[in-house]
Amino acid sequence: MVQVAFYEGNRFMWIYQSLFKRPEDLRFCKCNFKTNHTIRVKFEKLASILKSYDIVIFPQDKGTKPIKQKTWRNILTNAPPHQRRVYATFEGPYKLVNVKSRKRVSPRGDRFHWSWTFNSRSEFTMPYGYFQRSSNVNSETSTKEANPVNWAKGKTSLVAWMSSWVNTNWKRSQFVEKLSQLIPVHKYGKRYKSCPKGSQSCENKIREYKFYLALENSCCKEYISEKFWRTLDWGIVPIVVGPSKGDYERLAPPNSFIFVDDFTSLKALANYLIEIDKNDTLYNEFFRWRTEGKVHQNYPNYHRKKTHQSPETWFYSCSAVCKVTERYLREREELVEPASGFDPHAEWWGRSCRKCGAQPWFKEFQV
């Protein structure tokens, strides 16, 4: 039997209550390997007991504190050679205290063997969403082009924005306020109009808009959060500030978004939105990708019934535990050592965040 622990000794709050309930402290996962394995999975609060586990997963989120250096020394000193430790997070690096701190969590990357993040460089990846090209594009394209959809139909408003996470590494709210002085921008959230997050009524309201401000709280490599993928899924054009344009072009559907940094001024952006608003043909160009494939969201649906089971794509799930265990067993069988450890301060992760906006006019929104 393979023993897997989720180390929760540094957790002070369960932050996923709006998505799923906290999993049971002890459960068993059955995995479909070549050899039949039952995985014992435990939420473990005592660092001193981690030495008895084959795999230890360390969740990192807004509800966890950095692990003390003394605790880390004890974990590493007592860990058996075969143990594998996994850095796991659903968040972007900017939100994580242990990455934002000046003190490196691991000088040599020896504390974590693997990582589970949204970034494609991780051994185990869970992006917030992804674009899947259709295998029979030609036939689907001809069918959809013969029956075109006017995506502007029924949309009575121009731009919407929902405010949630207040702490950002750029002046996001000020950006929205300045844009709203040029064109109508309807703002929703605790400080603005009511639109209960995750409610069907809120979704129906946002679907009335042609554009949505999918502005990330930080500009880190490949950090394209659920707000972007949800916007595409709802048939709205996202206006984006986030990672590089290259990341969006590589990961998102082609010609599906408006990149703020493409414009020489905020006024130029506003004028462009007005131009598209008046021309359904131009607007519909942003939806041609729908003839080529489909968008999938990995972020849980707020409407789903809340249970103790995590969504399958999240690392708390049995599906995820099986995936990590399969790699662990394969490496043990082949006597393979991990090529290198994971350093939370790696260039592609903790140090991948940059100042948002490269245009001179955007400097007033930088910090």
Image (cartoon, rainbow, N blue to C red):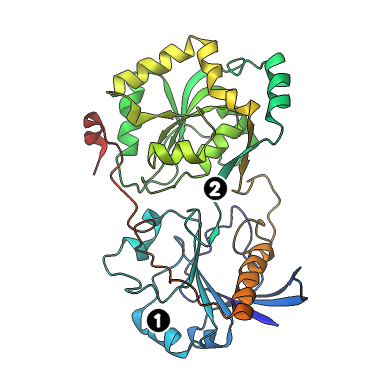
Label placed on residue 128? 2
Residue underneath mark 1: 72
For residue 156, say whether it is visible: no
Closer-to-camera residue (180/218)? 218
Q: Quadrant of the N terminus?
A: bottom right
Residue at image x 40%, y 76%? 110
Residue 172: quarter of image: top left
Label 2 packing within 10 angstroms: few (<14), some (14-19), many (20+): many
Where's residue 299, x and y in %? 59, 48
Closer-to-camera residue (251/215)? 251
Above/below status of 18 relative to 171: below
**Mark 2: amino acid:** Tyr
Left or right for 118, reference 148: left
- Element type where label 2 sits in the image: loop
Residue at image x 42%, y 89%? 77
Where's residue 340, x and y in %? 43, 71
**Mark 1: amino acid:** Trp
